[in-house]
Amino acid sequence: MYSEKVLDHFHHPRNQGKMKAADGIGQVGNPVCGDIMKIYIKVGQNADSVPIIEDIKFETLGCGAAIATSSMLTEMAKGKTIDEALKIGKLEIAQELGGLPEAKLHCSILAHDGLKAAVADYRQNKNKS
């Protein structure tokens, strides 16, 4: 049912845990399946002073696919500029994992939306200062 990569990210999630002093936090959930994802980002700047995702972590309560997509998202986004990270497609996360069953594709979309929410929170916090 699940690819080896999905199982690896489920059993050995990358970047899992709460981030202290995060620059942006996004929380999303799917009321139908009960999955809840919280994405934390720490934003720095590259040599051209462009904001980059210096660090990213997640806390996910949900099924194996939800945990695996959260983990994969963090690997895909870390080190990218914010604009590059936001270009990660909703289903690209599932593709990077070797695919997901049709009934679990919403997890890839949820991870994407969690990153968007974290970036929106970062931008809102930045504009307040």
Image (spheres, rainbow, N blue to C red):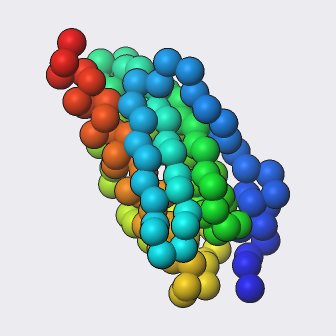
The residue located at (55%, 67%) in the rendering is 34
Vertically, is 123 above or below 118? above
Q: How many numbered marks have been drawn onto this rendered protein structure?
A: 0
On the question of residue 75 being in view, the answer is no
Q: Is residue 8 left or right of residue 96?
A: right
Vertically, is 103 above or below 13? below
Q: Is residue 39 left or right of residue 116?
A: right
The residue located at (38%, 64%) in the rendering is 89
The residue located at (55%, 63%) in the rendering is 35
The residue located at (67%, 41%) in the rendering is 16
On the question of residue 26 being in view, the answer is yes
Q: Where is residue 82 in the image (x, y as percent from the top left)?
A: 34, 38
Q: In which quarter of the image is residue 7?
A: bottom right
Q: Position of residue 93 (x, y in %)?
A: 52, 64
Q: In which quarter of the image is residue 24?
A: top left
Q: Quadrant of the N terminus?
A: bottom right
Vertically, is 70 above or below 14? below
Q: Quadrant of the C terminus?
A: top left
Residue that sits furthest to the top in the current view? 129
Q: Position of residue 125 (x, y in %)?
A: 27, 24
Residue that sits furthest to the left in the current view? 127
